[in-house]
Amino acid sequence: MNVRVKGRSQHYRTVTFDAGKNSVMLIEQRLLPHQFKIIGTRDFRETALAIKDMIVRGAGAIGATAAYGLAQGARTFRGSDLAKFSKHVEAVYQALKDARPTAVDPVNAMNDVRRSMSSGATVEEQQALALAAAEEFANEDVDHCRAIGEHGGKLIRNGMRVLTHCNAGWLAFVDIGSATAPMYAAHQAGKKFHVFCDETRPRCQGATLTAWELAQQGISHQVIADNAAGHLMQRGEIDMVIVGSDRTLGRTGEVANKIGTYTKAVLAHRHKIPFYVAIPLSTIDWNLRKGRDIPIEDRSESEVLGAWGIIPKSAIRNPKSTYVRIANPSSGARNPGFDVTPAELITGIITPAGIFKPRDLWKNRARFGG
Ligand code: MRU
């Protein structure tokens, strides 16, 4: 997407690779919306840490980061022994896979890279194939998001009020986004609509990232407290919900997404408001048989007990993120990062291949390459 940084509008991808430096280049998302900074990771361990510490986050973005990270790790191997090389690649794969457990995109992305590598006869060939496959994954992510926009944009009509949760936008992918792709497409088509961004406690990706993205694109929006959606739905002020997903089960249509998504789906169902989930194909898990088996990331209790923000005075000249404690000092917290929405609460899954009923993913799996 085009972003205005220091008065200049420029196109950025969230994840790129500097082959000369063997470095994965990432937008430091923890500094947004107050500061726009690009960082480079020096090796695959730093790349894994960038995923774990959420310098980069969002299903497609961590998928591309893991794909590049695997190529980055593979390219540091010296020697020609293929058995030693594949042991090394396996260690890189595990480090990147373990960084965050819920999103399936990193695993799907790295499996693609490894499949491509396997046709190389030498270490050098496999290293080159790894980077080419990572580039291909990133390009495909962009193509998928564009196609999601083409299908989903038609759902948005003039005057609609759309609710979204967390950030399934440009920042969560290589470009464009999943849940935001229909919004960007509708905006480009000249439609007028309004977006409510759930703030998405505890990390507030809606208030910080989605709101920043929509502001950058000039789309009318407001941030709402997570608890406000039910009230707005009851008053007829929300016409549609579009969210992303970190893992969607191809067999059942169940959707894992940021904590609080399930609550919104229940509310939307109660108020007969269409609830859509937008996903590229890399978010589909064709193996797991039930949502209960999706690994749900348990995150630090500090996220719930406090919050990060900018002291207003420092915001312009020297934006420094500061943690403030909110909760009672002697209390602990429970912090599951994701929840699972059952298929019956979902109106449709917006994919690059069209919009499907969640339970129809499986019978159409040939169309998705599943
Ligand atoms: O913890 P995060 O910020 O990496 O969570 C992922 C998400 O941004 C959301 O769950 C999103 O809605 C789906 S990712 C496209």
Image (spheres, helix red, strand yellow):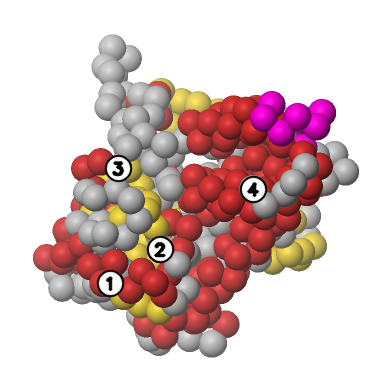
Question: Which callout, 1 or 4, points at the residue further toward the start of the chain?
Answer: 4
The N terminus: image quadrant: bottom right
Looking at the rendered image, the disc whose residue lies closer to the viewer, 1 or 4, is 4
Question: Which callout, 4 or 2, points at the residue further toward the start of the chain?
Answer: 4
Instruction: Residue under label 2, please give it.
Output: 370
Mark 2 nearby-residue class (10 Å; few <14, some 14–19, many ≥20): some
Residue 93: x and y, percent? 57, 35
**Going by the image, does 249 lie left or right of 149?**
left
Instruction: Residue under label 1, please give it.
Output: 363
Instruction: Residue under label 4, please give it.
Output: 118
In the picture, the disc for residue 294 is 3
Q: 243 or 122, which lies in front? A: 122
Magenta residue check for 77: yes
**Going by the image, does 98 lie left or right of 117?**
left
The C terminus: image quadrant: bottom left
Magenta residue check for 130: no
* Real-space Cα separation, disc 3 to disc 4, in angstroms: 28 Å
Segment colored magenta: 75-84
Q: 28 or 116, which lies in front? A: 116
